[in-house]
Image (tube, rainbow, N blue to C red):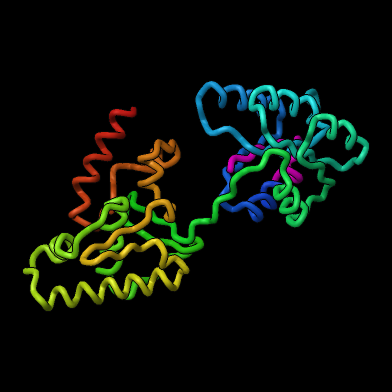
Amino acid sequence: MNILIVDDERLPLENLKRTVEKVLPEAEITAFMKPREALEYATSDQTAGFAKPELAFLDIEMGSISGLQLAKKLKEIYGQINIIFTTGYSKYALDAHSLYASGYLMKPISAKAVEEVVQNLRYPVKFYEKYKIQVQTFGNFEVFSNGKPLKFTRLKAKELFAYLIMKKGALCTNSEVIAIIWEERLNTEAVQNQYRHLVLDLSKVLMSAGASDILVKQRGSLAVLPEKISCDLYDFLAGDTNAASSYTGEFMAQYSWAEFTNAYLDKMTKSIS
């Protein structure tokens, strides 16, 4: 969900931004103190093809351009954008209603007030469940749950997960994974037994994070569900500009088998630039 916040006073702007982040932690928030800059952003956003904001929190009394005037302009640019006015005065309520606003919040604005208003938007927005697992592949491979590093009991269980992430949901056979993780050893019964323990360990780690559903097990094969994972690699491949800028030439640096993918990402980055 993409959100625009405009308020010409710094403290109310920062307070509202923190409140919205608390209610909608996965939202992309863009904030401005100058309404004219917000309008310029909206115009350039339209031409550059970035994701359009679905919701705007606008202070009403703001210098040369009021929140009411800005709302009219934003509706001309974005069409069905949800406008929520924020103010310390109740006298603008009728004007806000005439603009078909989705809400009218009196300052100071509480998290409960924000939560209630976003649940009753004029133009419904699809809310996505917050990803339970966040994966970093650029640089070293790391896994997080709610912003905290996920603890793996075995390093090879983490390596197994890294390989599955790199395969982007493709089913990987047991033999394939064993050949990658134990490249110097034969596929013996002892190694196969170690592999079964790794799968069990990985399952337990993901279960501890409430994310056991991201692992797909089929007879003799294993995969992850990419749509249930927040991952910089997946965002990069989807064309996310922020993910592209975070790639600095290293991909899963601790694993030698990731070098081919790293070379592919390098090539993609150079072709984009």
Q: In which quarter of the image is the C terminus?
A: top left
Residue 113 position in % (x across, y down): 77, 53
Q: Which residue is drawn at 54% across and 55% down?
A: 129
**Would you place residue 82 above or below residue 189 in this image?**
above
Residue 100 position in % (x across, y down): 79, 33
Q: What stretch is highlighted in magenta?
A: 1-15
Q: Which residue is drawn at 72% across and 28% down?
A: 35
Q: Residue at x 38, y 72 (%)?
A: 205
Q: Residue at x 29, y 28 (%)?
A: 271
Horizontal arrangement in the rendering, residue 262 relative to residue 239 (left or right): left
Residue 147 position in % (x across, y down): 49, 61
**Would you place residue 108 above or below residue 152 in this image?**
above
* Image-quadrant location for residue 80: top right
Give the number of marks: 0
| Residue 107 belongs to the span the image colors magenta | no
Q: In which quarter of the image is the N terminus?
A: top right
Horizontal arrangement in the rendering, residue 168 relative to residue 97 (left or right): left
**Would you place residue 30 above or below residue 206 in this image?**
above
Residue projecting furthest to the left: 186
* Image-quadrant location for residue 229: bottom left
Horizontal arrangement in the rendering, residue 115 relative to residue 268 (left or right): right
- Is residue 81 in view? yes
